Image (cartoon, helix red, strand yellow):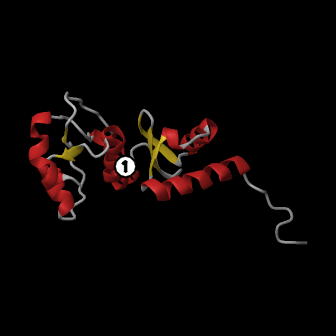
Amino acid sequence: MSPSRGKSKGNPTLAAALKTLKRLQKKHDGVVEASDLKDDQQRILLVETGFLQPVMKGWYICGSPSDNDADTTAWYASFWAFVSGYLGKRFGKRYCLNPEASLMLHTGNTTVPRQVTCVTIDSGTAKVDLTFDTSPPSAMRPNCYRRCWLATRW
């Protein structure tokens, strides 16, 4: 009897979804935008099985099926990659972080603050509430943009 005979073949749909997720995980440091997953069924399957965790509408982070709702590990490990991906998608290169966050990152401190302020050329103010009482860009002030651009762009 061959070793593969009598063994289950597994779930080919989940296997294909995980293969896609692995490619996206390498490409975006564990942060996935919904538009990156062309197949909605794969996205739904990955969320239902716990391999993807929703952050906000259209954005996900990679997770583990063994995580419970209160487990913060995946979120805190993905926070800065999420902030970079989200702000990059929303503003391109036309933003910078507040001086405190920029200095933390430039010195290698990746501690997740409760709030990150993003300064951008675009006018207006927006607050985005995220998981586990954290929040990237809370304020965007165009009048400060040119002053901090060179010092804080990461």
Q: Is residue 149 above or below residue 1?
A: above
Label 1 SS: helix
Image location of residue 81, percent across then percent down: 35, 52
Q: Position of residue 14 (x, y in %)?
A: 66, 49
Q: Residues within 10 Å of mark 1 (few under 14, many from 20)?
A: many
Residue that badge 1 annotates:
75
Left or right: where 96 falls relative to 77: left
**Which residue is farthest right?**
1
- Give residue 41's position: percent from left, percent from top: 63, 37
Question: Looking at numbered disc 1 in the image, what kind of residue is underneath it?
Answer: Trp
- How many badges with numbers are in the image? 1
- Residue in the picture at 32% in, 49% down: 84
Query: 106 or 17, which is in the foreground?
Result: 106
Foreground pick, 52 / 59: 59
Residue 37 horizontal side relative to residue 118, left or right? right
Q: Foreground residue, 43 or 49?
A: 43
User: What residue sits 73% from the left and 51% below the top?
Assistant: 12
Residue at image point 83% right, 71% down: 3
Residue at the far top in the pictured view: 124
Q: Residue 142 location in percent, x, y? A: 14, 35
Q: Is residue 42 left or right of residue 66?
A: right
Which quarter of the rendering shows the N terminus? bottom right
75 left or right, relative to 109: right
Task: Name the image quarter holding residue 77.
Answer: bottom left
Q: Quadrant of the C terminus?
A: bottom left
